[in-house]
Amino acid sequence: MQVTELENKGLKRQYKIIIAADKVGEQMDVELKVAGERIKIPGFRPGFIPMKILRQRYSASVQPEVLKRLINQHTGELLAEKKIRPAMTPHIAIDEYKPNSDLVFTVAFDVFPEVPEVAFEKITLERKTYDIGDNDLDEAMARIAETSPKLVRMDAGSKAALGNALTIDFKGMIGGSLFEGGSASDFRLELGSGQFIEGFEDQLVGAKEGDERKVVVTFPKDYPAKNLAGKEATFDTKVKEIYRKDLPEVDDSFAQDRGFGDLKAFREAVKGQMVKEYDMLVRNDLKKQLFDALEKKYDFDLPPSMVDAEFGNIWDRLKEARMRGAEPDEGKSDAELQDEYKKIAQRRVKLGLALAEIGGKNKIQISRDELTRAIVQQATQYPGQEQKVMEFYRNNPERAEELRGPILEEKAVDLILGKVQYTDKKVPLKTLAGDDEDENSDSDAKKSAKKSTKGKDKEESSTKAKKKA
């Protein structure tokens, strides 16, 4: 193998590799001999076909696999000899090859940068503190009661109002013809819930049991079903039953219905859950501040290939969102969005590499139990298909390994949070909850691109952390 260095600037490396013709020929013969064990040619027994005939008939078919194997082998030897770890899969280009001649190809890639150390004890974060008072707990209990109302059928002659639940039959027509998915019987609809197309529910306000109404609505222009988008539809609707929602009394009976001995025990359990949720909000806020601080303190070159790949992921999500009818950051040109999202990609890569370095230097380990819990957590995101998800990860262990990144990141974050300094600031519960709502208010595509600026960087850096670790 003859190696010539073509580029060694910053993080970029490029090499030309020449594999002698006789080495290529030897590998071709090995592959042809293996193929000859199973090939059937009239007049010859498998395994006894002359090499000359095998070369004539099958060299072209085995050549791609032979070249691929030789390129991978010699690229691996180059990386091992020079003790280089590419940041991404190397780009291979065959420059020259003809049968019975040398194989000449180039290997180009970015290497990982040297990540400097940062004195975490010199970082100061503002830690939010909170109290859960009786009034806060009362409001939480009331919200729980609102989620489990008792439906009481209203007297005949009662008029439907927003908030009432109706049992209805309906048949939808466009241009006088029924359309698929536009009819149902005994459908339960809460007026004001927004379940149906805008304007449908409003036209049933004031209806009584037994009333029949023609509800006329227009499907939105961006409606997912293209055959309905922008079209006017008429629904022949019959109101069969009207119910009001009665909220239960928050008492011992209410608690016992939920498996608790009395109301006091239920309140304690609810408070414990609230503490967990608000503690998580506090940690998320600290994590956002930490990532902002780390981004400023770390200064090192970023592998362009990693940044490009991360930007590609963000942009692909944006395009997917647009295909669903969403238009994140409306009013901005693609050029402006690309500039904004390129900066976000750079942030993600920087944080990912920094966290991976921290994990490596501190010998952070991920146990099999932790990986199993991560797989189970993934499965719970697909109700009814949990078993299929578990089987997928069992059958594809390389995909299970991808879950190590997020685990490593969280452990690295916890390690750093144990070393930084804090100033405490007491805030109302609504401030904590409000911050979280603000961070979740964007459209899907906008979230995918803006997570790093909103502090939800878990997804952004975990992949990179895994790759380096």
Image: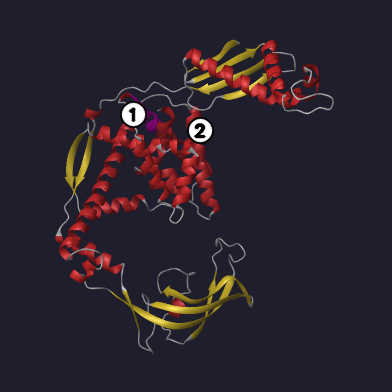
Q: Position of residue 463 (x, y in %)?
A: 43, 35
Which of 257/324 is in front?
257
**In the rendered picture of this protein, how many numbered marks are placed on residues?**
2
Outermost residue on the bottom side: it is 157
Outermost residue on the front side: it is 45
Q: Which residue is mark 2?
A: 308
**Other residues around mark 2 within 10 Å, as few (<14) / some (14–19) / many (≥20):** some
Q: Position of residue 94 (x, y in %)?
A: 66, 21
Where's the C terminus, which quadrant?
top left
Seen at 31% across and 72% down, the residue is: 149
Judged left or right of residue 24, residue 357 is left
The amino acid type found where label 1 is placed reads: Gly
Q: Is residue 251 visible?
A: no
Q: Position of residue 43 (x, y in %)?
A: 84, 25
Judged left or right of residue 261, residue 70 is right
Q: Quadrant of residue 16?
A: top right
Can you tell which of label 1 and label 2 is closer to the viewer?
1
User: In this rendering, is residue 142 above or below 70?
Assistant: below
Q: Which residue is mark 1?
A: 359
Q: Position of residue 33 (x, y in %)?
A: 71, 20
Which residues are drawn in magenta?
Answer: 349-360
355 magenta-colored: yes
Q: Is residue 103 visible?
A: yes
User: In this rendering, is residue 245 above or below 27?
Assistant: below
Seen at 37% across and 87% down, the residue is: 158
Mark 1–mark 2 distance (CA, rounded to whole Å): 24 Å
Disc with the residue nearer the chain's start (1 vs 2):
2
Which secondary structure type mostly characterizes the magenta part of the structure? helix
Seen at 29% across and 39% down, the residue is: 289
